[in-house]
Amino acid sequence: MASSLISGSPIKGLPVREDDGGKRALHTKVAKDRYRCISNFYFDLKAFVKFPADHNKYNGFIVVVHRIDGVSMECFLTIDEMENVKKFKGAINRSFSSKGGIMAHGINDNQLSSYIMGKMQEFALRGGKEMDGSLVIGRQPNFRSVNARGEFLDDDDPTGLAQKVDDPDTAVYILNDRLQINKDGVVPESHWRYRYMVPFLRNMPSAIADKKVKNFLQCHEVHVDLPLRFFDWELFISKAKTFFNVNFLPFAMFLSGGLATFHYNKIISCIGACPVPTAIGHPSSGKSTALKIICELAGMHMISQSSGEFVVSGLVNTTIPLCWDDPALPSMVSQPLVAVFNGLGSQTQQRGCEKPLTSFLLTVNFKLDSDMRSFERTTPIFFQRLKTEEGEQVKDYLDRKAELFSLASTRSLPVIIALSERLNKRILAQHIQFFRDRLHGLPPCLGDIYSVYRLILFEIIELVDNPNVIDCQMVDEFLKENFLPYVRSLYDVLTETELADRFTASC
């Protein structure tokens, strides 16, 4: 029964001790200098987690449980579970069940209750760490104090009187439960202000049954190869140019739209809307391949045969855009297009108002030329049918495709995040003017919408820094000679269709 003291206990006679074999657990004193092991575990409080108001009933503690065999695991317990011994043991085993659970048969409820409350008192006295609980993958709220001119202050206002505004440019992005990044790279765990709580809540019956929470439990996490190494934009874009051939600039336009949706709320704050980048073209035109490459590049989630309601429900638990490939019917896309256009969302029977945090990219084999309401909520990008080069073997084509996919890496994410700083009304103004000068007779909002694409294309050009691959003149020629005439032709068809429908309805 010999053992050595490892740490004091909040109550007398229940210390954490180490036996002759080096195993640590809770002990009880049975005689002078003699102790008996009464559990196969002990625990420490790591952090207090505070949720937003809608979910504050889940406020609680992250507890690191150490078992006698050396196995340790983080568990999460709500305040209610910390205050009730039976719930406490059940909550620990809820998380620890995959490792065999814990046993505390030698501790009575009063002892364990006192031990728990004592640990909470210790945590409070030493000023334990407090974190914001998050259920959202992607960008986290980043409210900072501003002065009377709306400029962000370096330090928080000690008076608490200054107005606070969300600052997306310096925000943290949660990609999964182990990784958080910002524009500068990986955020060390010691600097985490947020904690992604979905992995804990997935094991909690009350959360699984909670209609305000259960949708968040299905969110797609982003997996990143570490360490975050340099991303070679010149190599990636040059290989894309070779692969896509005649569809290179449509691909670049589609890519810029994808990066714009990554900053969905910032775009809406600048121009009031964020239309869906939509690749249109015949089968085998490369648009689905383009979508998959963008998906790989920015850590997005790919879906295909899904309902409009499913798509909308998947946009409220993440700020990372969704990639929707080839929906079967035009009617399927109408609700999602309306829901994401200006960020107001849509009303559902089961979950109430769903306000999207992001948007989606879309590929279709049909034209939205029978529905002006849907069409005006997209940015149509036409892909020509791809042709293999004369004499090219299928193996060569597949090798080029595989090489391009190998280059499309989430290592690009810090640069994509940093684009937020360039998305502002002052910089957009010159790009808006470019389109308004060339879109006479069409809705003036189109200039605002397309300006975002041109701005991001120009940013990509700077990242590539090789005019032999892509330059501003090349992009502007494509916009003037291909993109804008295509948009105008679609509006001509839509206007004729709309007028015909109105005439028929009036007869």
Image (tube, rainbow, N blue to C red):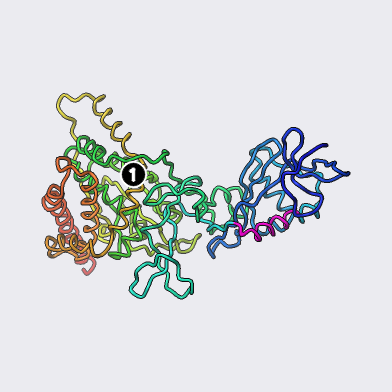
> Can residue 430 be seen here?
yes
Question: Would you say residue 171 sits in the magenta stretch?
Answer: no
Q: How many marks?
A: 1
Which corner quadrant of the image does residue 69 belong to? top right
Quadrant of the image containing the C terminus? bottom left
Camera sees residue 309: no
> Residue 122: within the magenta?
yes
Question: Which quarter of the rendered picture does the N terminus lie within?
Answer: top right
From the viewer's perspective, tell me whether residue 175 is left or right of residue 436.
right
> Which is the main secondary structure of the residues drawn in magenta?
helix
In-image side of 2 versus 214 (left or right): right
| 408 and 446: which is toward the camera | 408
Q: Could you tell me residue 198's position as x and y percent?
A: 54, 50
Residue 285 falls in which quadrant of the image?
Answer: top left
- Residue 122 percent location from the top left of the image: 68, 57
The residue at which mark 1 appears reads as 412
Label 1: which secondary element: helix
The boundaries of the magenta stretch are: 115-128
For the residue pair 192 and 403, the one nearer the viewer reads as 192
Residue placed most toward the observer, 261 or 278: 261
Q: Is residue 24 left or right of residue 50?
A: right
Q: Residue at x 13, y 52 (%)?
A: 476
Near-viewer residue (170 or 20): 20
- Above or below for 388 versus 36: above
Amino acid at the residue labelled 1: Ser
Residue 455: name its quadrant: bottom left
